[in-house]
Image: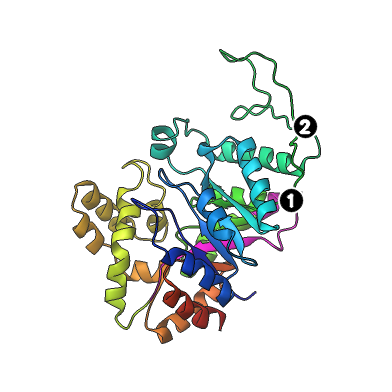
């Protein structure tokens, strides 16, 4: 299967992006990109920008990478997904993820415990709500429907069926996952995997066993299972200068995200064999020495997780991605970079 391209607009920083963001969305569609994605953390939400920009496109798929589960009950996520699917003419892809305990408990005020069990239960309710075959009921411990037995509950709730008929009974759901158990769960219950840090050079030993474990438990065929890998993509004559553009972001994720004792992003380079380097990056970052933490990110690690350097080098490095399990590369950048990516990846 040939590699596809997607544009990942990410989430907003301190304010809305420049008008160049819309120009990039339109150029991505013109260039033949397969998809456009938005995300959320604890600022801008994922759905509003996707609807706004998506309304000015016609063909490209529209996905959330990711919509955080704790921000919405599963029924609300299903409502949003069905609405977006109708508005886009069947182009919506629901990307979900559990986020991390600092955001889940600190921003949304929800418990983070048992993320795998919560994900399974959440996806099941979303699928039932979208399929609209019967009133939705769930006896799970995390999202019981109807809810009962709690203080303040009237006991008058009853299973309901969406008043909105879905455009598609089976709307594609992708899950953000990094750990082995989460990847296996994704392969079992989802239609695709949103991979934030993926190394094609470790495909056989780190990812395929997890995917195969999940596929073995899957109830539906997995022939159309997709893997969307978000990667830095920088065309630059100097590899080290290109790497320097990425180091601060990697230092933030590997060193400053989550808590010292629970940083899922940091575990990715650890599993890749960079345990000492990952520990050092985290120590420096949490001590407030962010520049040193960035400088401690090895160029080799960056090259295994990104596509950087001169065009000829990227063209060569792309072969590892084409031989991997990845089906689509999600990149970010202005229209000029998207044109370079289209030329190199899509030919």
**x%, y% of residue 212?**
63, 57
Q: How is the rendered protein coloured? A: rainbow
**Nearer-the-camera pick, 208 or 288:** 288
**x%, y% of residue 29?**
57, 71
Q: For the residue labelled by badge 1, is the local secondary structure a helix, a strand or a loop?
A: loop
Hey, which quadrant is residue 204 in on the image? bottom right
Q: Is residue 30 left or right of residue 252?
A: right
The region drawn magenta spans 213-234
Q: Residue at x 45, y 57 (%)?
A: 10
User: Up-down: is 177 above or below 336?
Assistant: above
| Label 1 crowd bin: few (<14), some (14–19), many (20+), radius 10 Å | few
Q: Is residue 179 left or right of residue 185?
A: left
Per the model, the C-alpha gap separating discs 1 and 2 is: 16 Å
**x%, y% of residue 51?**
57, 53
- Whether the magenta-drawn stretch holds residue 220 is answered as yes
**Nearer-the-camera pick, 95 or 307:** 95
Q: Quadrant of the N terminus?
A: bottom right
- Whether the magenta-drawn stretch holds residue 235 is answered as no
| Label 2 crowd bin: few (<14), some (14–19), many (20+), radius 10 Å | few
- As drawn, the residue found furthest toward the right would be 133
Q: Which residue is mark 1?
A: 170
Residue 135 — which label? 2
**Nearer-the-camera pick, 211 or 177:** 177
């Amino acid at each position: 299967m040939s590699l596809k391209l997607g544009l990942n607009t990410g989430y907003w920083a301190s304010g809305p992006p420049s008008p160049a963001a819309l120009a990039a969305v339109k150029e991505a569609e013109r260039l033949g990109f397969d998809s456009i994605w938005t995300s959320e953390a604890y600022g801008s939400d994922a759905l509003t920008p996707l609807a706004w920009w998506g309304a000015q496109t016609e063909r490209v798929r529209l996905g959330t990478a990711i919509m955080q589960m704790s921000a919405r009950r599963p029924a609300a996520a299903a409502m949003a997904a069905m609405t977006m699917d109708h508005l886009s003419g069947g182009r919506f892809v629901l990307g979900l993820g559990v986020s991390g305990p600092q955001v889940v408990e600190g921003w949304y005020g929800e418990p983070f415990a048992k993320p795998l069990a919560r994900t399974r239960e959440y996806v099941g309710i979303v699928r039932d709500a979208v399929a609209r075959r019967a009133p939705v009921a769930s006896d799970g411990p995390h999202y019981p429907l109807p809810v009962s037995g709690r203080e303040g509950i009237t006991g008058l709730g009853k299973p309901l069926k969406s008043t909105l008929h879905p455009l598609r009974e089976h709307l594609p759901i992708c899950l953000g996952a990094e750990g082995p158990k989460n990847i296996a769960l994704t392969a079992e219950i989802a239609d695709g995997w949103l991979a934030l840090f993926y190394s094609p050079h470790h495909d056989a030993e780190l990812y395929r066993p997890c995917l195969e474990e999940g596929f073995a438990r899957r109830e539906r065929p997995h022939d159309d299972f997709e893997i969307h890998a978000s990667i830095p993509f920088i065309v630059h004559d100097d590899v080290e200068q290109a790497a320097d553009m990425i180091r601060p972001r990697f230092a933030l994720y590997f060193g400053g995200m989550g808590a010292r004792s629970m940083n899922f992003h940091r575990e990715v380079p650890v599993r890749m064999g960079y345990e000492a380097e990952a520990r050092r990056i985290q120590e420096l970052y949490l001590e407030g020495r962010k520049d040193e933490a960035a400088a401690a990110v090895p160029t080799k690690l960056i090259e295994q997780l990104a596509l950087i350097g001169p065009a000829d080098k990227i063209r060569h490095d792309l072969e590892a991605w084409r031989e991997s399990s990845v089906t689509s590369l999600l990149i970010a950048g202005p229209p000029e970079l998207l044109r370079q990516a289209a030329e190199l990846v899509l030919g």
